[in-house]
Amino acid sequence: MNEYLVPLTSACTLVTLNYIAMKVRSRMLFDSYEQFLAPLLTGLACIIMMLEPLPEALGLIDLRSLPIFMAGLRYGLPVALLSTVLPSGFSFISHEDHAWFIIAQDLLAPALISSLFHNKEYRSGFLDIPIRHALQICSYVFLLRLVIYGFLASKLTWLYAIDQLFMLAIMSAAFIVITVMVNDENKSWRLQRQLELQANQDSLTKLPNLRSFMPIAANALHKRRISIMMIDLDNFKQYNDQFGHLEGDQLLRDVSSVLRQHIDEQDYIARYGGEEFILLSTETNPQRLQAYGERLCFVVIEAFLHKRQHDLTSITVSIGISTAESPEADLKRVIFEADQALYESKHSGKNRSTLYTDMQTASAPIANHKKNA
C-alpha cells in the first residue's frame, strides 16, 4: 500500500516546485533566456520525479511525464523534446530497467501529445490554458500506456489497469492544480500590465500620455539627436462651443488616430494635453522635417474634408518643430523651442508647420536692425 504514496508525494513535490519556479520567474528577467531555461528546469523537475525508484518496471510509474506535459503545452514540440534530454540521460546513467521503453513512453510520447495542444498565446500569458487540455493530455497518455502494455503483454490485466487509473487520477489532479496556478499567475501579470498601460496611456485618445513620453524621449536623446514636434488642433475651442464637448472628444480621438497612422514607423507620438500632441522624431534634416510637418497637416485636413463640407468648419493642425543641437541637449529646452515654433505657426495663419531654426533666422535681421538703430 505504501507504494501508492509515492506518486502522491511526488505530485505534492512537483506542485511545490512549480510554485517556486513561478515566483522566481516573476521576480527575475528570464524572458530573454526562456528558450534555454525552460528545457533545463523542466528536465531537472523530471529528474526529481525519477529519484524515487519505480515500484514496478511496467506497472505503477512515477510522474516524470508531468513537467513534459506543461513544456509541450506552453512552449511547443521543440522545447518539449529538449526537455527530455536530461531525464533521458539520467535514466541511462542510473541504469534504469527498460530505459529505452520508458523514455519513449513517459518522455517522448508525452512531449508529442502535449505539443498537439500548444498555442503560442499560452507562452506569452495572454491566454489561459483550458483545464480540458490537462484532462485530455492525461487521458491520451493513459490510453497509450494501456495499448502498449496490452501489445507487449498480450493480455491486459485488471491490476495494471487499476494502477493506471490511479495514476491517471493523480496525474490529472496534479496537472490541473499546476495549470490553475499558471493561469492565476498569468492573470496577475495581465492585470499588472493593464494597470501599467492605464497609467501610461491617455484614456481619451488611447495614445501614450506625457508621463510615458518623457522618459522615452530622454532616453532617445541620450543616444542621438532627435526632433520634437508640437502639434495643436486649430480652432478647437470654437468647435467645442459649436458642437459640444462630446463631439470635441470624438474629434480628438479621430485626429489622434489619423496622426498615429501617418507618422513615420520609428517615431513616437503622445498626447501632450488638451488639444495638443507631441511627437518624437528621429529625423533631423530641416528640409525633410519641414516636408514631414506639412504632410501631417495635409493628411489631417484631407481626412476631415467631409466634416468641413457638412459642418462648414475647417479641421486643421498647426505644428512647431525643434531639433536638438546635440545628444547632450536639454529635452525640456527642445520642447520649449518646439512650442515657440508652434506659437509662430498659429500666428502665421495656422494649418502649417514652422521650424524653430527658421524663426531664429527670420528674427536675426530684425534684431540687428534694432541694434544698429
Image (cartoon, rainbow, N blue to C red):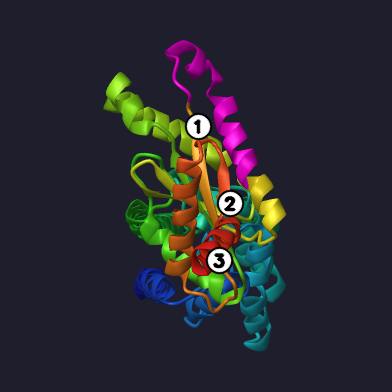
Q: Disc 1 to disc 2, how far (Cα)?
A: 43 Å
Residue 125, position as x, y percentages in the image: 47, 55
Q: Which mark is residue 316?
A: 1
Let me know if residue 248 is in the magenta part. Answer: no
Give the label, 2 or 3, closer to the camera: 3
Give the label, 1 or 3, closer to the camera: 3
Left or right: residue 349 compared with residue 83: left
Helix, strand or loop under label 2:
helix
Helix, strand or loop under label 1:
loop
Residue 315 visible? yes
Magenta stretch mostly in which secondary structure? Answer: helix
Question: Residue, x 49% and y 57% (percent of image)?
Answer: 338
Residue 151 visible? no
The residue where tag 2 is placed is 120
Specify start and end residues of the magenta stretch as a single range: 293-314
- Badge 1 amino acid: Thr
- Badge 2 amino acid: Lys
Q: Which mark is residue 43?
A: none
Question: Residue, x 43% and y 62% (percent of image)?
Answer: 336
Q: Disc 2 to disc 3, how far (Cα)?
A: 66 Å
Q: How many marks?
A: 3
Kindly indicate the quadrant of the structure image that contains residue 284.
bottom right
The residue where tag 3 is placed is 368
